Image: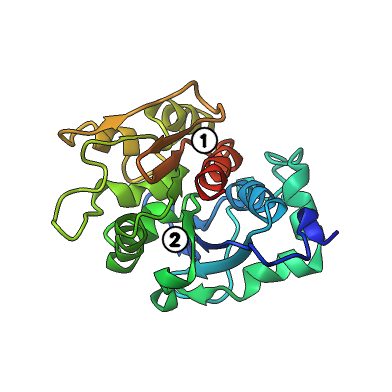
Amino acid sequence: MLPYGKVDDVSNQKNVAFVLSNKAVSSVTGWPIGFWLAELTHAYMEFVDAGFDVTLFSPDGGALYIDDFSDPYAENGYSADDEISKQFLDDPGTKSLLDSTEPLAELDESAFDTVFLVGGQGPMETFRHNPVVEGVVRDFYEAGKPTAVVCHATAVLLDATGSDGELIVAGKQWTGFTAAEEEYVEQNVGQKFQPFWIESEAAKIDDTTFIAAAPMSAHAIRSGNLITGQQQHSGAAAAKLVIEDLQ
């Protein structure tokens, strides 16, 4: 057995492209921000256990920055019980994946069976209004391939359109980090935390349905070939829906 139960038989292997945010600085707090580790690691575990080959991409390529509160070894202790993320970081082979992601402009949709956009604080600054990220979502979606977007990465869905100019979420049910969850975070941090709230922005869009489950519950939705997950507890659930579609 290879890490996370990966199998040696690659005869029917599928390929998944993860898309993660590079390091950025919050326009609200001024803090360094990046991607949420559990949204990668828990989904990664599901894909590799199912025999998928994984490649990590980011808008700029290169090394990534883990959101501090998602690091199980951070002094704040917020994610200290995340054993899956600890296993990922403790394995030199998987941890090294975070040091050398491929540039997103080099992502060839035809070489992959699915794409999975990971959330965190970074995507609020680096995914929205990013034509390259929007283009990747459009390419996979229009190719009829499972197009998965989790947590704050769903910020890209507020503007991403198909080739016809229509929003991809038009006529769709979807989810993402909710207003109730944003309110909870701000109460605990003691200040405004995000430049906008995804659920509040989604409410301004005609002909789309944003579905909020209980705060911090595992919640993923399939609507056509668009798959969305609510927050960091939903990465594995979203990955399972992708795997079901491709088996």
- The residue wearing badge 2 is 25
Residue lying at 73% horizontally and 41% vertically, measured from the top left: 82
Q: Residue furthest top?
A: 214
Do callouts 2 and 1 mark residues in contact (Cβ within 8 Å)?
Answer: no
Q: Residue furthest front?
A: 11
Secondary structure of the residue carrying numbered label 2: strand
Q: Residues within 10 Å of mark 2 (few under 14, many from 20)?
A: some
Placement of 123 over or under 185, stated as above or below:
below
Res. 174 in view: yes
Q: Determine whether, in the image, residue 245 is placed left or right of residue 198.
A: right
- 210 or 62, which is in the foreground? 210
Residue 103, horizontal then vertical, whole percent = 46, 76
Placement of 145 over or under 191, stated as above or below:
below
Residue lying at 28% horizontally and 32% vertically, measured from the top left: 200
Alpha carbon of mark 2 to alpha carbon of mark 1: how far?
A: 17 Å
Q: Residues within 10 Å of mark 1 (few under 14, many from 20)?
A: few
Amino acid at pointer 2: Val
Residue 115, horizontal then vertical, whole percent = 47, 58
Secondary structure of the residue carrying numbered label 1: helix
Residue 199, horizontal then vertical, whole percent = 32, 33
Residue 149, horizontal then vertical, whole percent = 43, 48
Amino acid at pointer 1: Val
Q: Residue furthest right?
A: 1
Res. 73 in view: no
Q: Tell which circle, 2 or 1, labels the residue nearer the N-terminal end.
A: 2
- 193 or 45, which is in the foreground? 45
Q: Determine whether, in the image, residue 202 is placed left or right of residue 69.
A: left
Q: Which mark is residue 189?
A: 1
Placement of 101 over or under 45, stated as above or below:
below
